[in-house]
C-alpha cells in the first residue's frame, strides 16, 4: 500500500512534480509505480531515467518485484531495458551519462517521463525531454515526475525550479504565448509542484528498519541535514559548508552571512568586481570594506534571463557599462563615492580588436585586471565565511533583491569530480568568480570556522512527534 505522501504525489494533476528532500521517503517506488498508471492502454509508452547505466540496476531490480506482482505476464527485455505489459504498453529505462546522450531520444515520444535523482542531471537535459513528452495516442495523459535529494551537479537549478519558488504543495504556473500561422497568439501554460518527503513519511520503512534513522543521524553534519531533514542548504559535496542564512540573526549579524542592509559610513572602502557574460550571465558586485577589513556585498547586477538559471540576456558590454553607471549614479551607498573596479583579466584581451575593457571604458566604467588564481580565491571565501567564537564572520551579504542570485548560487556550488580542490565550472559560477576577484584584492589570513552551538530544542518542526519517537535515544 502507498504511504500517505506517496498518495499525495499520485494525486497531483500538474505537468511537472518533484518528490524529494530527505532519504527514505519511498521516492523510487513511487516513480516506478506511477509509470504503471496507464499500462492497460496498448500504445502507452513510459520511460524512467537515471544518470548512468550502473545506477539503473537498483531501479530495474525493484521493478522486477513491483511489476511482476501487478502484472505476472509482463516481460522484461534485458538488452533493450524495456518492460512489455500484456496490453502491449511499454516502460523503458534510460540514461544520459553525457550531454550528447539526450540526442539519442530525438524522434522518440513518451506519455510518462520519470527522473530518479534529478539533481544528477543538468537543466538542459531535463528540459530537452519536454519535447519528447507527447501522446502516443488518444486518451493518454502526458506528464513528468522526478525524485531526488539535495546535492549533486543539478542541486542549484532543481532547488530554484521546485523548492525555492514557492511553499511545498503550492502549484506554480508559468504562462507564455506562441505565434499561430494566422498571426494570432495562443496563450499556453505549464504547471509544477514540489512535494517534500522524509524517512518519517515512510512508516513501513521505519517498522522494517527501525535503526535507519540512527544511520542517518550518524552521518557528517552536512549529509545528516540533507538526508535526514531534507535541508536544501546543506548537502554532501557542498563547497562552502560554512554558509549560513538565518533570518532571525539578520540584525545581530551573528551566525549568518545574510544581514539587513544599512548606510555605508563615508570612511569605508567601496569597490566593484565584474565577470563578463553574454550567452551566459554577466555579474557585477559592489562591496564595502570596513575598518577591520570585513567585506560586505551591498548590491549586485546579474544579467540572467528571468526564470532560466544560467542563461544570459545577451546584452553587449557597452549596455552593461551603461547599467553600471546608472546604478552608481543613483544608489545612496554608491553615488559620489570613489569606486575601484576589479575584473576577470580576460576582458583585457585585444587579440580580436577592442577589448571588453576598452568598450566599457568609453562608457566611463573602468576596470583593473584581478587575480584569477582559482584555489587561492576559493580559500579566501573559506577564511572570510568562517565564524569566530563571537558568531561573526568577515564576509556579509545585504538582504536585498539585487543579491538574491548570490544567495541562491553560492551555497549550491559543488566540487569538481576531477579537480577535487576546485569548484565545478559547469555550474552557475559567474557570481562566484566575480566575487572571487574582489576577495583576492583584500586577502586575509587563515581563519578556522567555529561551529554554531546547537539549540536546546530542535528547531525543525517537521514531523516532530515522529522524529522524537525514533530519535530520542540518539539525542540523549
Image (cartoon, rainbow, N blue to C red):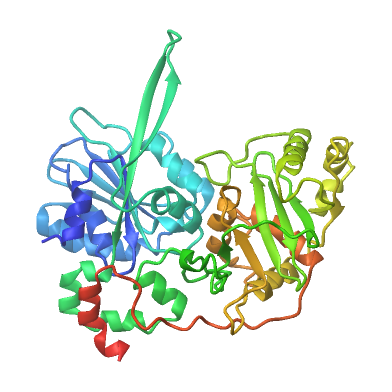
Height in image: 342 above or below 310? below
From the viewer's perspective, tell me whether residue 90 is left or right of residue 172. Answer: left
For residue 441, which quarter of the picture? bottom right
On the image, the x and y values in percent for residue 18 come to: 33, 52
**Which one is in front, 331 or 48?**
331
Question: Does the image show residue 462?
Answer: yes
From the viewer's perspective, tell me whether residue 435 is left or right of residue 307. Answer: right
For residue 376, which quarter of the picture? bottom right
On the image, the x and y values in percent for residue 221 come to: 45, 79
Q: Residue at x 79, y 34 (%)?
A: 318
**Which one is in front, 173 or 328?**
328
Height in image: 26 above or below 454? above
Height in image: 351 above or below 419? above
**Which one is in front, 47 or 304?**
304
Question: Does the image show residue 72?
Answer: no
On the image, the x and y values in percent for residue 332 come to: 71, 47
Q: Residue furthest bottom?
A: 476
For residue 203, which quarter of the picture? bottom left
From the viewer's perspective, tell me whether residue 176 is left or right of residue 323. Answer: left
From the viewer's perspective, tell me whether residue 377 is left or right of residue 114. Answer: right
**Which one is in front, 343 or 61?**
343
Quarter of the image that includes the N terminus: bottom left
Q: Residue at x 32, y 69 (%)?
A: 23
Q: Residue at x 30, y 92 (%)?
A: 476
Q: How many marks?
A: 0
On the image, the x and y values in percent for residue 132 come to: 38, 36
Amino acid at each position: 500500500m502507498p504511504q500517505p505522501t506517496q498518495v499525495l504525489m499520485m494525486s497531483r494533476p500538474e505537468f511537472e512534480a518533484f518528490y524529494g528532500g530527505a532519504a527514505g521517503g519511498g521516492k523510487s517506488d513511487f516513480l516506478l509505480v506511477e509509470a504503471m498508471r496507464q499500462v492497460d492502454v496498448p500504445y502507452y509508452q513510459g520511460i524512467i531515467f537515471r544518470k548512468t547505466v550502473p545506477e539503473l540496476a537498483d531501479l530495474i531490480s525493484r521493478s522486477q518485484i513491483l511489476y511482476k506482482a501487478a502484472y505476472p505476464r509482463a516481460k522484461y527485455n534485458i538488452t533493450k531495458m524495456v518492460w512489455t505489459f500484456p496490453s502491449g504498453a511499454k516502460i523503458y529505462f534510460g540514461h544520459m551519462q553525457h550531454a550528447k546522450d539526450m540526442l539519442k531520444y530525438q524522434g522518440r515520444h513518451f506519455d510518462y517521463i520519470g527522473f530518479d535523482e534529478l539533481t544528477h542531471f543538468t537543466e538542459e537535459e531535463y528540459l530537452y525531454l519536454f519535447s519528447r513528452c507527447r501522446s502516443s495516442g488518444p486518451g493518454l495523459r502526458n506528464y513528468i515526475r522526478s525524485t531526488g535529494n539535495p546535492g549533486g551537479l543539478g542541486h542549484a537549478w532543481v532547488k530554484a525550479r521546485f523548492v525555492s519558488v514557492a511553499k511545498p504543495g503550492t502549484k506554480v504556473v508559468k504562462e507564455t504565448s506562441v505565434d499561430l500561422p494566422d498571426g494570432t497568439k495562443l496563450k499556453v501554460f505549464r504547471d509544477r509542484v514540489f512535494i517534500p518527503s522524509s524517512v518519517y513519511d515512510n512508516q513501513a520503512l521505519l517498522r522494517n528498519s527501525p535503526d535507519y534513522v540512527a544511520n542517518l543521524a550518524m552521518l557528517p553534519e552536512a549529509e545528516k541535514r540533507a538526508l535526514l531533514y531534507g535541508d536544501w542548504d546543506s548537502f554532501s559535496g557542498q563547497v562552502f559548508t560554512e554558509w549560513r542564512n538565518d533570518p532571525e540573526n539578520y540584525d545581530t549579524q551573528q551566525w549568518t552571512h545574510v544581514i539587513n542592509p544599512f548606510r555605508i559610513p563615508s570612511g569605508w572602502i567601496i569597490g566593484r568586481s565584474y565577470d563578463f557574460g553574454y550567452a551566459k550571465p554577466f555579474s557585477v558586485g559592489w562591496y564595502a570594506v570596513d575598518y577591520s577589513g570585513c567585506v560586505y556585498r551591498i548590491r549586485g547586477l546579474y544579467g540572467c534571463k528571468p526564470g532560466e538559471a544560467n542563461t544570459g540576456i545577451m546584452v553587449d558590454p557597452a549596455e552593461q557599462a551603461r547599467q553600471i553607471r546608472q546604478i552608481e549614479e543613483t544608489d545612496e551607498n554608491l553615488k559620489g563615492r570613489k569606486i575601484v573596479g576589479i575584473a576577470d583579466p580576460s576582458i583585457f584581451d585585444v587579440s580580436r580588436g577592442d577589448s571588453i575593457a576598452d568598450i566599457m571604458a568609453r562608457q566611463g566604467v573602468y576596470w583593473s585586471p584581478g587575480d584569477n588564481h582559482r584555489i587561492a580565491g576559493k580559500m579566501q571565501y573559506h577564511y572570510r565565511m568562517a565564524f569566530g567564537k563571537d558568531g561573526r564572520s568577515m564576509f556579509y551579504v545585504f538582504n536585498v533583491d539585487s543579491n538574491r542570485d548570490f544567495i541562491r548560487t553560492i551555497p549550491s556550488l559543488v566540487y569538481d569530480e576531477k579537480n577535487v580542490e576546485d569548484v565545478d565550472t559547469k555550474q552557475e559560477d559567474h557570481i562566484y568568480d566575480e566575487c572571487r576577484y574582489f576577495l583576492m584584492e583584500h586577502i586575509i589570513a587563515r581563519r578556522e570556522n567555529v561551529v554554531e552551538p546547537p539549540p536546546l530544542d530542535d528547531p525543525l518542526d517537521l514531523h516532530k512527534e515522529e522524529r522524537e519517537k525514533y530519535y530520542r535515544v540518539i539525542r540523549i
